[in-house]
Image: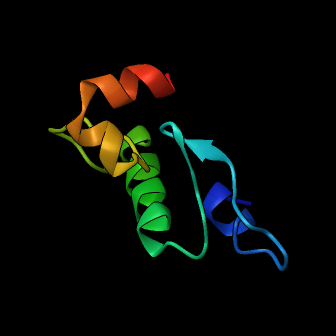
Amino acid sequence: MPCWERSRQPGAEGGDPVGGETVNYKIPATIDATALSKMADRGQITGAVIDGPLAFDNAISKEAARIKA
């Protein structure tokens, strides 16, 4: 079962960490980011570096990313 589907299981608050953040069925963007990341891993998306989900603070702040790493 894909990690974004596991996070939709009844009672699940979050799923597997992917790209540094947790897939959460309550936040649809995390599911979308995970799906896009997996598609890139499989070669379905080319010409770009894709990773996710990624928290907004990490995306805009090197310091936040360093602290969370």
Q: Give the farthest residue toward the left.
A: 47
Residue sitting at x 32%, y 50%: 56
The colour scheme used to paint the residues is rainbow
Asked whether the viewer can see residue 22, the reply is yes
Q: Is residue 58 left or right of residue 18?
A: left
Screen quadrant of the N terminus: bottom right
Residue 19: x, y in percent? 48, 38
**Residue at point 21% right, 40% down?**
60
Q: Please state the horizontal and vertical placement of residue 63, each as a whole percent of the image.
A: 30, 23
Q: Position of residue 2 (x, y in %)?
A: 66, 58
What count of labels does the image hold?
Answer: 0
Question: In this image, 47 relative to 39: left or right?
Answer: left
Closer to the camera in the image, 35 or 24: 24
Residue 46 position in % (x across, y down):
22, 42
The residue depicted at 74 percent of the width and 64 percent of the height is 6
- In percent of the image, x 47 and y 74: which residue is there? 28
Q: Is residue 39 left or right of residue 69?
A: left
Q: Is residue 24 left or right of residue 7?
A: left
Is residue 29 depicted above or below 35 in this figure? below
Residue most toward the right?
11
Q: Kindly tell me whether residue 43 is visible in this rendering.
A: no
